[in-house]
Amino acid sequence: MFADDVRNALSSVGYLADDGLSTAVFLSMELHRPLMLEGDAGVGKTELAKALARWTGGELIRLQCYEGIDAAQAVYDWDYARQLLHLRAAEATGESSRQTSEALEAELYDERFLIRRPLLQAIATTSGVPPVLLIDEIDRADDEFEAYLLEILSDYQITVPEIGTFRAEQPPLVILTSNRTRDVHDALKRRCLYHWVEHPEVDREVEIVRLRVPDIAPSLATEVAQAVEFIRSLDLYKPPGIAETIDWATALQRLGAINLTTESISSTLGTVVKYREDAERINSTGLDQVVEHASRT
């Protein structure tokens, strides 16, 4: 398998990757190294993990990071309700009186009461196909959680003190994403391969639109992609990502548009920009400027 094979395979499941991203994915799979993707929101980082799962047939296991996330949410926890029910059942049947406290405690921390969170799910899977572990928006997590990830991503093992150590039979395919709201520590980046995901070139964005909105008029797909390229150049607070381009194209297609006009842009602008200040910036620049850029040949 080579990088071209990866690009073709991703294309077959609806994800159009450029040469750089295809090569990064290929190397991540060959070297069994996590792949960290950084870039603006909406450039397709999370969607890549979903496409990998569709292609490989592996389970997609997603860990959404946030400030304050810890092992109980990310790795494992104990089902305290079931443990309490087990304890009460043992008391009701008199079983607890025939056991030592150590034996009863050992029963409470049996694997049947273990709740496997995403990281443990990915490490302890026993299916034949490695899962795809998506650690989404790692830049939102705390430094302490990053440090915890270092061991897991280095050895692909997790220790549960009451049970033992779980080791991955086959390392999962790991994708970490960051919108760069803060810098991720160098120690974590050193464990990963790295790729910066850019907004696509116009030609590739046209392909994406036509793939995801198959009924759209070819001319409209081109005009939407060129209009988005122009809008992104306006130094907006939140430039539109690929998802917004697809939403805009879908809205225009459903409205029966064949070409972009100032009227159609004005009525659908909320599908492509999500902040009032950005909408005002586009309007002050002039919707006719957007149409002019969109219709260039």
Image: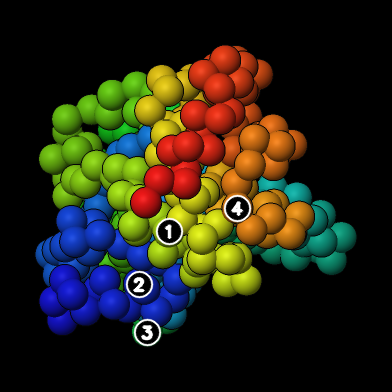
Secondary element under disc 1, as helix, strand or loop, is helix
- Residue 115 appears in the picture as rendered: yes
Residues at marks 3 and 1, CA–CA distance in whole angstroms: 37 Å
Disc number lying in front (3 or 4):
4
Quarter of the image where one finds residue 94: bottom right
Of labels 2 and 4, earlier in sequence is 2
Of labels 3 and 1, earlier in sequence is 3
Of labels 3 and 4, earlier in sequence is 3
Circle 4 sits on which residue?
259
Residue 214 lies, in percent from the top left, at: 57, 71
Secondary element under disc 3, as helix, strand or loop, is loop
Circle 3 sits on which residue?
128
Of labels 1 and 2, earlier in sequence is 2
Circle 2 sits on which residue?
10
Quarter of the image where one finds residue 205: bottom left
Residues at marks 1 and 2, CA–CA distance in whole angstroms: 17 Å
- Residue name at image x 56 percent, y 44 percent: 244
Residues at marks 3 and 4, CA–CA distance in whole angstroms: 49 Å
Q: Amino acid at mark 4?
A: Asn
Q: Nearer the viewer, residue 56 or 163?
A: 56
Q: Amino acid at mark 2?
A: Leu
- The numbered mark at residue 40 is none
Q: Residues within 10 Å of mark 4 (few under 14, many from 20)?
A: some
Disc number lying in front (2 or 4):
4
Q: Amino acid at mark 3?
A: Gly
Q: Residues within 10 Å of mark 3 (few under 14, many from 20)?
A: few
Secondary element under disc 2, as helix, strand or loop, is helix
Q: Are marks 3 and 2 in contact (CB under 8 Å)?
A: no
